[in-house]
Amino acid sequence: MKVFGSKNNGVNYFVRKGAYAVIFKNQNQNEIGLIRTHEQQYFLPGGGIEKGETYEDALIREMLEETGYSIKNNYPFCHAQRYFMSTLPVKRPMLSDGHFFISQLDQKIQKPTEKNNYFEWINIKECEKLLFHVHQYYAVQQALKEKGANHEFK
């Protein structure tokens, strides 16, 4: 497991366990599906684990809420964490504990239920500058290695 940021002694971190999908648009892996918020921040699709959910259950639920799509062929491939200072909804120290899957979009089931979040296909070379969390960018890099893709990054 890769850890980003540093844990400060004496600081109480809010731990947010989450499941996130790396979804490539096609076999070339040149575009990836990201969620853009109304604050113009980009994240991998997915989110927090609710009581009683597995990581995959949470990912399936979050995908429906954020995109309206079901997903399939969910392959767990990476676990990474990031220590940081959250600003939304309140300023507090957080540990984002991300479990990452390579997934495929399946069918459009419903309209997204989360307002002000937009699913977009983004060129893979834009990920580093767009993704809010460095551990999510790390997961994208690991997914490309898993898929045997040959993309050059800065």
Image (cartoon, rainbow, N blue to C red):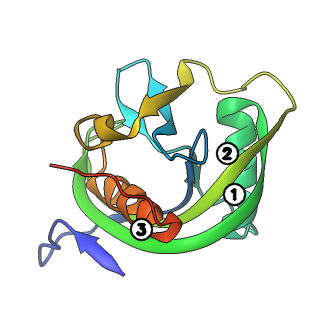
Q: Amino acid at mark 1?
A: Ala
Q: Which residue occupies 56% across, 45% down?
A: 24
Quarter of the image for residue 142 reads bottom left
What residue is shown with label 2? 62
Mark whose residue sits in front, 3 or 2: 3
Disc 3 and disc 2 in contact, CB within 8 angstroms: no
Left or right: residue 121 compared with residue 65? left
Quarter of the image with the N terminus in it: bottom left
Q: Which residue occupies 54% across, 73% down?
A: 77
SS at mark 3 in the image: helix
Disc 2 and disc 1 in contact, CB within 8 angstroms: yes
The CA distance from mark 2 to mark 1 is 6 Å
Count of numbered circles on the image: 3
Q: Amino acid at mark 2?
A: Glu
Q: Amino acid at mark 3?
A: Lys
SS at mark 2 in the image: helix
What residue is shown with label 1? 58
In the foreground, 149 or 111:
149
Give me the disc on residue 93. none
Q: Which residue occupies 30% across, 39% down?
A: 125
The CA distance from mark 3 to mark 2 is 25 Å
Sequence-earlier tag: 3 or 2: 2
Quarter of the image for residue 107 reads top right
Q: Position of residue 48 (x, y in %)?
A: 57, 55
Give me the disc on residue 145. 3
In the foreground, 142 or 131:
142
In this orientation, does residue 120 appear? yes
Say few, some or many: other residues with alpha carbon within 10 Å of mark 1 (under 14 / 14 to 19 / 20 or more).
many
